[in-house]
Image: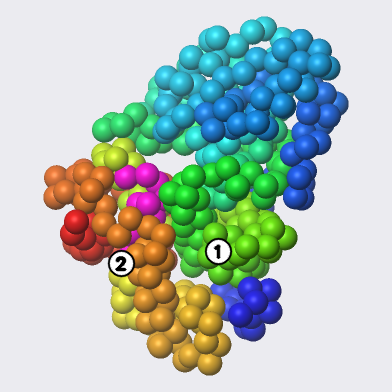
Amino acid sequence: MSATTFDFTPALPPHLTPFEIAALPRLRFGIDLRDRLAVRIGEISRKPLLILSRSVKNSAFGARLIDDLAKTGETPSVFTVSGEPSPETVDEIVQAAPAGIDWIIGIGGGSALDVAKAVAGLLPRRDSVMNYLEGVGAGRPYHGDALPWLAIPTTAGTGSETTKNAVLARPGQFKKSFRHEALVAKEVWLDPRFLDTVPRDTLHATALDAFTQLLESYVTRRANPFTDALAWHGMQLWQGALATFEQAMEEDVRMEAGGRLMLAATLSGITLANAGLGAVHGLAGPLGAFTRAPHGMACAALLAPVTAANIHALEKDASPEAATALHKYAQVGRLLSGDARLPDAAAREALIAALTRLNEQYGPGSLRRYGLDEAAMEQVIASCRAGSMLGNPLVLPDETLRAALTVAAGAE
């Protein structure tokens, strides 16, 4: 069923409450758009600093971009990022960067973009990101004197290109954000051609992260008509696109599917920035600190059990807000099942079944392989009550979260 023609009856909240939408970058989308990137960088920057993921740095595109920029002036400063971004990585780049940098160019997955965002915020003052990191830093106010930066995502996942927070981690200790409106990218370039270079596991993890962000921001307490429209359309774009991208033989069909994935991911960044997330991300954040679970894989394994817990609790709640969230869950169930005729209760059951299949097909199945044991569960629960958890449709008690983590841990 086409993702763009699925019938949709809007579920308005019981009453419209005030909301605001944060500043957005200038967005450009197109297949082979990246071939014009060197020209654009030359137009906006006299001395750019490039922060690239390792896969981009080692690719033919990365080598050509650096060579093209060198032809227009001095050889650009290039730093490479791999793995989970840390405060130490950000600080090292800030201290090593030459004087006179006027733009930051971030190209890669969420890690490269988060590092680029943080470096853009810190380079003018050249101090440590630990002065500003939420919850674990020195608590100093950040005044927003950031350099402009250009975001080029190469995966279809985190939505970091449209958000104001850089997520940084120290394994075993924390995973926290450096956040300010001045950190939003000035421009975002989206080219689905990049997805051809993404490893299969990374493609799956980032795509499932994007879908989780769309679903959670759709049912969050802070959802509004603007974010609802984007989240719903993002899920329509996402539905079926991952399978088509991996299986289609025709290049134009693959690129259209890749474009749908990339647009869905960017929409998820906009919706999470303006509506928040929920308990899946509330748990996935500390999971990234206390286990080896990649973020997208944590979301994939948690999505079905947490959604089931939310639905079960909402069905016992007689409030209009609960009815709205339940109706939205049913809408997504009809979308993923492809059956627009399902009544709400059956559609919610179909949603849980579909989310379970997504984990089995594209996710890890079990998080126990990443070190999620009983001790780690207690660390996660003790650290999960701030941030994304606050947007969940309702408060889930510790025992419910523990049960969801136990399902996600599964068995090897």
Q: Is residue 263 above or below residue 45?
A: below
Q: Is residue 209 left or right of residue 175?
A: right
Residue 196 image position (x, y, % from top left): 60, 47
Q: Label 2, secondary structure: give it.
A: helix
| Mark 1 or 2, nearer chain start | 1
Q: Quadrant of residue 396?
A: bottom left
Start-end of magenta stretch: 293-306
Query: The C terminus is located in which quarter?
Result: bottom left
The spot of residue 172 in percent (x, y) is 26, 33
89 shown above or below 263? above
Q: Which residue is mark 1?
A: 247
Dots 1, 2 in contact, CB < 8 A: no
Magenta segment's dominant SS is helix
Q: Is 404 in front, or is 361?
A: 361
Residue 386 is at least partly visible in this image: no
Q: Quadrant of residue 73?
A: top right
Q: Position of residue 126 (x, y in %)?
A: 56, 12
Q: Which marked residue is nearer to the observer: mark 1 or mark 2?
A: 1
Question: Can residue 379 be seen here?
Answer: yes
Identify which residue is drawn at 54% across, 59% down.
Answer: 246
Label 1 secondary element: helix
Q: Which residue lies most toward the front here?
A: 249
> Label 2 belongs to which residue?
305
Closer-to-camera residue (322/191) = 191
Residue at image x 60%, y 11%? 97
Find residue 173 and report its horizontal and vertical position in percent.
28, 31
Callout 1, which amino acid? Answer: Gln
> Is residue 290 within the magenta segment?
no
